[in-house]
Image (tube, rainbow, N blue to C red):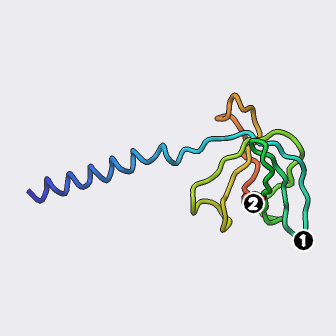
Amino acid sequence: MKKTVSLLAVLAAAFAILAAEPAFAQEKTPVKVKGSVVVTGVVIVHIQKNGKSLDLQCNEGTSSCKVLQSGDYLMVELPENYGMYDCKNVEIYRGDPAKPEDAEKIGAYCLIGK
């Protein structure tokens, strides 16, 4: 009887993990970079997402922090407690919005609302 209960518990846990996996798959949404500046070691990238102005920030000198040129990019908002910054973490990709799975990761940033 104990083996049956243990087996059911393991199966239930495995199902919960597998069922939750799609929740971690994040969607790449198009954003437009308006410009970037560096202020005292902090890279600030001005973007527009769905017509709303936002800022991205990262620490200059880290390998995942890039000054982005103006243009079109894809952005992934990471789940809570993912990423290197203590804020809403995002990743920026360069690629075709029609083929987001082929996009190339450019950097990781902290999303700052205005």
> Residue placed at 35% from the left, 50% from the top?
16
Task: Compare residues 47 and 24 and report the one nearer the observer.
Answer: 47
Q: Residue flagged by tag 2: what amino acid is it?
A: Ile
| Left-right relation of 25 to 107 | left
Residue, far left: 1
Q: Residue flagged by tag 1: what amino acid is it?
A: Thr
Q: Considering the numbered disc 1 on the image, is that residue within a helix, a strand or a loop?
A: loop
> Residue placed at 66% from the left, 60% from the top?
88
> Residue placed at 66% from the left, 47% from the top?
76
Report the residue marked by disc 2.
112
Residue 3: image x %, image y %?
A: 13, 56
Which mark is drawn over residue 52? none
Q: What is the spatial separation of the Cα atoms under label 1 and label 2, in whole angstroms?
A: 17 Å
Q: Is residue 77 above or below residue 84?
A: above
Q: Nearer the viewer, mark 1 or mark 2?
A: 2
Residue 52: image x %, image y %?
A: 78, 47
Q: Is residue 7 above or below residue 100?
A: below
Task: Compare residues 100 and 31 and report the one nearer the observer.
Answer: 31
The N terminus sits in image quarter:
bottom left
Which mark is drawn over residue 40? 1
